[in-house]
């Protein structure tokens, strides 16, 4: 373990997580989000289930965990916002100051990602009252589908819901590390897991649990395509929040005594558990009502409500489901704006309040692009993709993996091994394993993804 902060001064205690558990909960809060509950079940469903899940688990363990450690390490040693942390570690390593652009990339990525994240989180929030008032009871499948489409058609309510998500986010983040982020994570994360377990219990008693378990865990490699493997890989980065500066800023609030390896592994386990539990809460219900597991992005907004409308106590548990989804999305939203807030306050010397207002306004404006992608701007397309699809593709397909790659290269090849050893308990076997994975496996695999994406190689 480290005596850290050689590269700069340590943060004041009020600017640190008060306990190791608080960091784990906040980082798990960043990791567990729409990616776990909305995206994971539907991409697993679209890619045939079991074999996809297996590849995803391998990606998390062999690539995700080492990358998460690398990002937390940079933040913890840098002790500042991503831009300054990268700058001071580059200085410490005698490397070019241009490395601070990796921090800038992280801040921008988080900012852009949040602009569409608040919109999808807004759908989740909107579905709480819709479900609670029994709207889905007795509806025909096509009526539920029409409702979702109708919901997307109206820009004003969508803007209202995403604005609410943003205000809730700023309300928490504006209070700072201990009073805002830490308090919220300590309260919301245990609640989230309790909700998830209740929903899995409900699904196992009312749905086809065995069929769901088989679908998720019995690998059928016939169903797995090369593009499925790439999706599993990209999703592993996305779900662990790697490459967007979120884990770097959370790492910068971590005290030097805490083991980065152990906490990162725990965060990855919690994140994976949340995704698998979400699958076990959703698929039994989907199968029990003879619905399609490969329903795409509409899986939880259309397929699931169809089932909730017919199930005993469906209104109650459906409401709980969307409440849980909103909580998961919110704790991730905090981590997406925190890098920008920290950068504005530390670098531009703004108050946290001012930084929140400024950052929030920018995100709000940009979020309109995503809102309009589903209605008045549905035909403003670039290479056949709407604004929302282009942004998602740019961020999930390029910016997050690129950020992750650069952070991996930086810790593996630019930082002095003595520095990384100091942060990661250098005598341990875990450190040596990390070094091998981060130096060789991680960069090679990410480069292969890029080469395949630009069509240089075909997988
Ligand atoms: N991991 C979050 C999710 O699964 C998304 C996220 C990505 C959050 C990058 C922060 C940074 O929804």
Image (cartoon, rainbow, N blue to C red):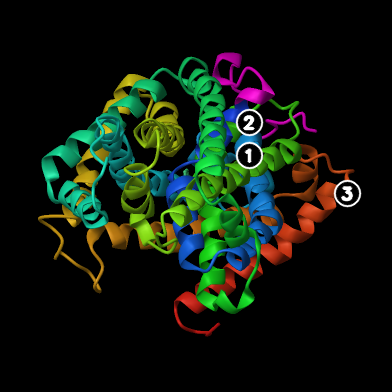
Pointer 1 residue Cβ closer than 8 Å to ligand 1: no
Q: Which label's residue is closer to the chain start, 2 or 1?
A: 2
Q: Residues within 10 Å of mark 2 (few under 14, many from 20)?
A: many
Disc assigned to residue 270: 1
**Circle 2 sits on which residue?**
24
Task: Give residue 74's position: percent from left, percent from top.
Answer: 62, 42
93 vs 70, nearest the viewer: 70
State whether residue 279 is above or below residue 191. below
The residue located at (46%, 49%) in the rendering is 285
Tell me whether the residue at label 2 lies in contact with that at label 1, contact meaning CB atoms closer than 8 angstroms: yes
Badge nearest the viewer, 3 or 2? 2
* Residue bounds of the magenta highlight: 1-22
Disc assigned to residue 28: none
Give how far apart the Cα atoms at labels 3 and 2 are. Answer: 23 Å
**Circle 3 sits on which residue?**
429
Task: Give residue 199's position: percent from left, percent from top.
Answer: 51, 36
Task: Give residue 52's position: percent from left, percent from top.
Answer: 58, 65
Q: Which label's residue is closer to the chain start, 1 or 3?
A: 1
Q: Which label's residue is closer to the chain start, 3 or 2?
A: 2
Residue 207 visible in this rendered orientation of the protein: yes
Snapshot quadrant of residue 409: bottom right
Is 344 left, or right, of 414 in this rendering? left
Snapshot quadrant of residue 441: bottom right
The residue located at (15%, 38%) in the rendering is 157
């Amino acid at each position: 373990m480290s005596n850290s902060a050689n590269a700069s001064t340590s943060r004041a205690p009020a600017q640190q997580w008060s306990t190791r558990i608080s960091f784990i909960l906040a980082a798990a809060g960043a990791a567990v989000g729409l990616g776990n509950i909305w995206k994971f079940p539907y991409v697993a469903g679209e890619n045939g289930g079991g074999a996809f899940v297996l590849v995803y688990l391998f990606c998390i363990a062999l690539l995700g965990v080492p990358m998460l450690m690398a990002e937390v390490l940079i933040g913890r040693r840098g002790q500042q916002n991503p831009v300054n942390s990268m700058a001071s570690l580059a200085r410490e390593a005698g490397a070019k100051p241009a490395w601070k652009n990796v921090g800038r990339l992280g801040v921008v990525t988080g900012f852009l990602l949040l602009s569409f994240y608040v919109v999808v989180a807004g759908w989740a929030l909107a579905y709480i009252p819709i479900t609670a008032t029994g709207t889905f009871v007795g509806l025909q499948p096509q009526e539920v589908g029409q409702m979702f489409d109708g919901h997307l058609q109206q820009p004003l309510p969508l803007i209202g819901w995403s604005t609410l998500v943003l205000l809730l986010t700023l309300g928490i983040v504006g209070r700072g590390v201990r009073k805002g982020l830490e308090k919220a994570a300590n309260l919301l994360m245990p609640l989230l897991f309790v909700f998830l377990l209740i929903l899995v219990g409900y699904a196992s008693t009312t749905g086809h649990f065995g069929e769901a378990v088989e679908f998720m865990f019995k690998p059928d490699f016939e169903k797995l395509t090369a593009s499925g493997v790439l999706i599993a890989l990209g999703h592993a980065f996305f779900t662990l929040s790697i490459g967007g500066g979120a884990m770097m800023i959370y790492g910068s609030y971590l005290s030097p005594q805490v083991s980065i390896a152990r906490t990162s592994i725990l965060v990855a386990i919690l994140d994976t558990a949340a995704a698998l539990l979400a699958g076990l809460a959703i698929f039994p219900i989907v199968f029990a009502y003879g619905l399609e597991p490969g329903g795409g992005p509409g899986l939880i907004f259309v397929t699931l409500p169809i089932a909730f409308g017919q199930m005993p106590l469906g209104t109650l548990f459906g409401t709980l489901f969307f409440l849980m989804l909103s909580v998961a999305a919110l704790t991730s939203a905090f981590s997406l704006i925190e890098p920008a807030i920290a950068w504005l306050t530390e670098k531009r010397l703004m108050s946290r309040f001012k930084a929140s207002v400024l950052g929030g306004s920018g995100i709000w404006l940009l979020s309109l692009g995503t809102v309009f992608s589903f209605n008045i701007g549905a035909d403003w397309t670039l290479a056949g993709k709407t604004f929302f699809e282009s942004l998602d593709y740019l961020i999930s397909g390029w910016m997050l993996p690129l950020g992750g790659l650069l952070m991996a290269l930086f810790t593996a090849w630019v930082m002095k091994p003595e520095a990384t050893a100091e942060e990661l308990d250098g005598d341990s076997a875990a450190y040596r394993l990390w070094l091998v994975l981060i130096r060789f496996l991680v960069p090679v695999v990410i480069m292969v993804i890029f080469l395949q994406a630009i069509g240089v190689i075909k997988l």
